[in-house]
Amino acid sequence: MASRLHNFRKMLAEVLFGMSGHEAVRAYLRTRGSMDHLFMLVTFGDLVGMPIIPPYYSLRLLPFLVPSLQNWKRRLLREKDLIDHIF
C-alpha cells in the first residue's frame, strides 16, 4: 500500500512538473546551448576561419574545452534547413 502511494505521488509530481515547468527547462537548456555555442565561437573561431580574440587566451582555455570541441565543430558546420530553425 505504501509503495502504491509513493508511486502515485511520484507520478503526480511528474505530471505537475510537465504541466508547469517543462517548457521553462527546455527554454533554459536551449539558451544555455546557444550561449555555449557563442562562447566556443568567440574562443575558438580561428579553428573554423573566424579569429576573434588572440590565440593566447584560447590556448589557456583549451584544456578545459577539449571534450566539447569536436561536438561544437560538428554542430557549427552541419547543414541546416528551415525545419531546424523551427525546432
Image (cartoon, rainbow, N blue to C red):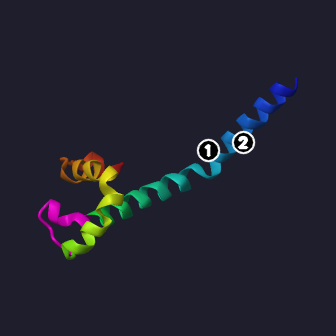
Q: Residue at x 43, y 60 (%)?
A: 32
Q: Can the viewer see residue 73? A: yes
Q: Quadrant of residue 3?
A: top right
Residue 41 appears at what percent x and percent y?
A: 25, 64
Label 1 secondary element: helix
Q: Can the viewer see residue 42? A: no
Name the residue type under label 1: Gly
Q: Work out whether 16 lies above or below 61.
A: above
Residue in front for this viewpoint, 65 or 52: 65
Image check: 24 left or right of 34?
A: right
Q: What residue does disc 1 label?
A: 18
Residue 9 appears at what percent x and percent y?
A: 78, 36
Mark 2 and 1 residues: CB-CB less than 8 Å, in contact? no
Residue 73 appears at what percent x and percent y?
A: 22, 52
Q: Work out whether 87 lies above or below 31.
A: above
Q: Decide whether residue 17 is among the magenta residues.
A: no
Q: Work out whether 75 lies above or below 32.
A: above
Which dot marks residue 13?
Answer: 2
Label 2 secondary element: helix
Name the residue type under label 2: Ala
Q: Residue at x 36, y 61 (%)?
A: 36
User: Total number of numbered labels?
Assistant: 2
Image check: 66 left or right of 77?
A: right
